[in-house]
Image (spheres, rainbow, N blue to C red):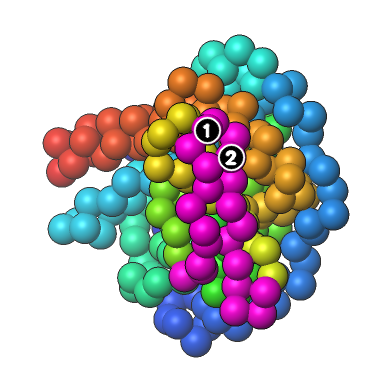
Amino acid sequence: MEIVEAPPGWPVNEAEALAVQDELRTRVVLDEPGPQVGTGPVTGVDVAYDDERDVVAAAAVVLDAATLTVVEEATAIGRVTFPYVPGLLAFRELPTVLAALASLTSDPGLVVCDGYGRAHPRRFGLASHLGVLTGLPVLGVAKNPFVFTYAEPGQSRGDFAALVADDGEEVGRALRTQHGVKPVFVSAGHRVTLESACAHALHLARDFRVPESTRRADALCRRALREVSGRA
């Protein structure tokens, strides 16, 4: 399998990455509702790392949003060329994620990231960055909160509480996707509202805590990483 390298001009340090975030976040669109819930394709993307070899595996899994059945899968393997810096993980992951998405032959539709969009210290997490670069509607569903405060949501499926920034902005929601199970953390990325992002996340998490799109992409990227590590 071809190893994906970062494109020419891709940031290689924190200062360069922060400048890119400052530039691109002005292009985020948050006043479009996004696709109708339960219709069309929805694509989960996720990555897995081999830190010893500085290798990252990315997966993109397209589901039929109505049935949550798999339509298409794609993977890519890349080199990690950016250091680990909280808040800048997109610069480690996106070249390989973009390669996986580019390998798809079908329309990805709505994209769901295992990470953040607006719920980010600079309001430009992975989901927003991916959305701006591709033009696709993207939302983020994270397993853990980042730096924002929230009240514990109710115990029923669909209950939520706001993720609140220091300035009082609601940047995301802690969403209970299964009764009595700890919440996930949803934020809008690009071309989708927070309300719509939560509705999509709840629909996709029909049987489990995390969206089916994320579950499938997580399993696929881990499998791809095991295969490439076994050949190394």
Q: Which residue is mark 1?
A: 156
User: Which quarter of the figure has residue 137?
Assistant: top right
Q: Secondary structure of the magenta portion, mostly?
A: loop
Q: Is residue 27 left or right of residue 118?
A: right
Residue 167 lies in the magenta-colored region: yes
Quadrant showing the N terminus: top left
Q: Is residue 89 above or below residue 131?
A: below
Residue 52 pos. (x, y %): 16, 58
Using the rendered image of the protein, determine whether residue 71 is visible from the camera's viewpoint: no
Q: Is residue 79 left or right of residue 107?
A: left
Residues in magenta, as a range: 147-168
Q: Residue at x 34, y 30 (%)?
A: 219
Residue 101 pos. (x, y %): 56, 39
Circle number at residue 48: none
- Residue type for callout 2: Asp
Q: Which residue is mark 2?
A: 159
The answer to which of 137 and 143 lies nearer the viewer is 143
Q: Residue at x 68, y 35 (%)?
A: 199
Q: Residue at x 52, y 33 (%)?
A: 156
Q: Is residue 178 left or right of residue 195?
A: left
- Residue type for callout 1: Ser
Q: Are marks 2 and 1 in contact (CB under 8 Å)?
A: yes
Using the rendered image of the protein, determine whether residue 55 is visible from the camera's viewpoint: yes
Residue 73 pos. (x, y %): 49, 25
Q: Is residue 193 above or below residue 156?
A: below
Q: How many marks?
A: 2
